[in-house]
Structure formats: C-alpha cells, structure tokens
Amino acid sequence: MNYAKTFMRTTRSLGLMAVLLGCIGTVSIAQEQAANTAFPEAVTVPLTEAVSASANVQRVFVGRLEPLRVVDLAFQVPGQILELPVSAGDRLEKGALIASLDVADFELAVARAQASFDLATSEFKRAEELANRGAGSEARLDSAKAQLAQAEVALREAERRLAQTMIEAPFDALVGRIFAEAFSNTTPAAPIVRLQDVSEMRVYISLPEEVAALARTRAADFSITATFPAAPGYEAGLILREFVTEADPIAQTYVVEFAIAGEPDPRLLPGMTANVTAGLEVSGETGGVLVPVSAVDTTSAPEPRVWIFDGSTQTVAPRMVRLGLPRENAIMVLEGLTAGERVVSGGWWKLIDGMIVRPDAS
C-alpha cells in the first residue's frame, strides 16, 4: 500500500515537471520566432565602393542643324511669272528680288482707279463750292464725298495689287527650294520659293529624362558645345533657346533647342548632323562620386537613395542622394555620398533599415 502511494506521488511530480518543461519550451520557441520576425535572417548582398569622379562629366548627343525659320513665299495675286532670277542655294540679302509677274493688267487697273479718283475729286470740289455759296444741296455734297472716298479706296487697292506682283526677300536668307518656273502661270498662295533664315543657326537634340531634369534645373552648370562632321576643326558654343517640356510619347525624350554662338561656319547647311557635348560641372565640397546604376534604390522615387553598408556592425541603412549624369553603367552622385563608402549594388529591395547583411564574396 505504501509502495502504491509513493508511486502515485512520484508520477504526479514527473507529470508536473513535464508540463513545466513544455511551457518553458513553448516560451523559448515563441521568443525565437519573435526575434526572427524583428530581426530577419541576414541576407547576402553585393557591395561596391563609391569612387571619386572627375570634375566634369560629359555626354555626347547627336543633333540636327536647322535654320532660325523656314518660310514659303507666294504671290497674293494671280498672273504670269516673268522673272525668277534666283536658284536653290543662293544667298539673298533683305530686299533682293525673288520673282515678279507681268504687270500690264495691274498697271491698267491702277490707271483706271486713278482716273475715277480724279473725277471724284473734281465732283467733290464742285459740290463743296456750290454748298458754300448756298447753290447746292447738302445731299449732293454728301454723295460727292462718299464717291470720293470709294474712289480713293479703289485706287489704294489697285496700287496694292500692283505692288504684290513682286516678291522680295523679307530677311537675309538662303534659298532652299524653287517651286515654280519662269513664264508659268501662278495662283494666289501657290508657293514660289522656300527661304531659310540662316542669320542664326539652331541645333536640336533630344535628351533622356534624367539628363533633361538636370538641364532644366541646373542649366548654369552645363557647358554645351557642338562639332560637325561636315566642318572638321570647327567647334561652336551653344546657347539655350527653347526647352520643350512635352515628352516624346515613344522615346520619352525632351527636345532642346540651342543657338550657335557667334557667326556660324559658312560650310554649315540646314539639315546637317551635329555632335553635341554636354559637360556638367560637379559642385560641392565633397565633389562627385560614381556608383553603379544598379545601386540606386528606385522604390524611393522621386527622391533617390542608396543603401550604405556599415562594416563595424555589418548593417545597412538607406541614405538620400542627389544624382547627376549617368556615365556608361555608372551614375554620378553629386551630394549625399563620399568616396570610399560602401553601398549595396543589388538586391536592395530585400533590405530594411538596420538589417544585418553578409557581403557577397563572389
């Protein structure tokens, strides 16, 4: 009997110990799971070191040379072209004759209008004298005045049409194309000649969005020059004229228009190719550094950031940076990073602030 009681007490003690150990094990597992949730398992990430960049970063773009403006000129009256003394490629000064029509019919119209005007003037003077002496009515004077006004308008219109029988260069220009032939008949608004205003030559380039953003906000930091395959040895400085803020829907680029500073080389013609070099001067106390493009965390848009590796704690932390121009597979960091700092060059989408990581040894 005593043995039975002792056995039962011992069994109860062992059961209680098992329960306590089970609780302790459950708490330990829960604590481990919580720790794993708060501090995820270290991940392996590739690292790279930010390196110093030169003081000037350059990109070259292919552009197109165009005149300041292109104008198609036409007669405003119909007639036969008698003179067309220009040819494609001619350089014209302002006021130079480009084309003229047969003026015989227009001169006759002016003569008729002049005769009607002279007659109306005489009638008006006669009616005015009679009205002043009280021998003529006011109605006759008003009628003569109206006829004189109509004759004057008709004369001015005839003279204007006669003047429109000649086309003169409205500015110093280059003849780009001839659309008509001498002695052929033309109609109003039919193009006769195309003029190109080469008093200022323009260069058009298309910038990718990351460069366009810098050019828009830091235009003073850029130095823009152009060279031309058709004019070896000639390099021209460029002046910003227009910045189109509507992006090309396909290429996602922005058109920028520059003017050639100074007198352009006479070898240059509209439509020629230009190689435009855009140099960005790096400013700031620390200068600029280069990191791989893959190191830029794009999930933080519109403010870019990189992940900095702390070798003493083996942890990473994000840092906002200001980017510059890309250079091949790297990108310039203008502010927020110094040479020698190590950054995560890939896999940053798996990271959180303060996470322990293992550098990739490969």
Image (cartoon, rainbow, N blue to C red):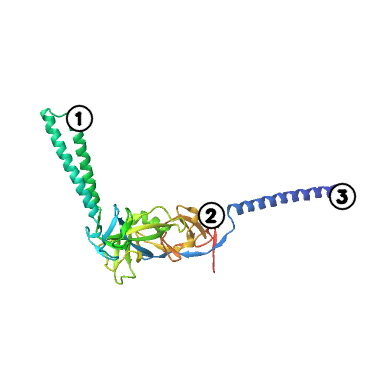
Give neighbour class at mark 1: few <14, some 14-19, many 20+ (Cα, 10 Å): few
Q: Which quadrant is home to the C terminus? A: bottom right
User: Which mark identifies residue 3?
Assistant: 3
Kindly report the distance in space between the C-alpha atoms of the residues bearing marks 2 and 1. Answer: 98 Å
Q: Secondary structure at mark 3?
A: helix
Residue 210 seen: yes
In the depicted view, which residue is nearer to us: 13 or 192? 192
Asked if residue 214 lies left or right of residue 233, the reply is right
The residue at the point 46 percent across, 65 percent down is 329
Q: Amino acid at mark 1?
A: Ala
User: Which mark identifies residue 335?
Assistant: none
Give neighbour class at mark 2: few <14, some 14-19, many 20+ (Cα, 10 Å): some
Q: Secondary structure at mark 1?
A: helix
Kindly report the distance in space between the C-alpha atoms of the residues bearing marks 3 and 1. Answer: 154 Å
Residue 90 is drawn in which quadrant?
bottom left
Give the mark toward the camera: 2 or 1: 1
Asked if residue 48 lies left or right of residue 170, the reply is right
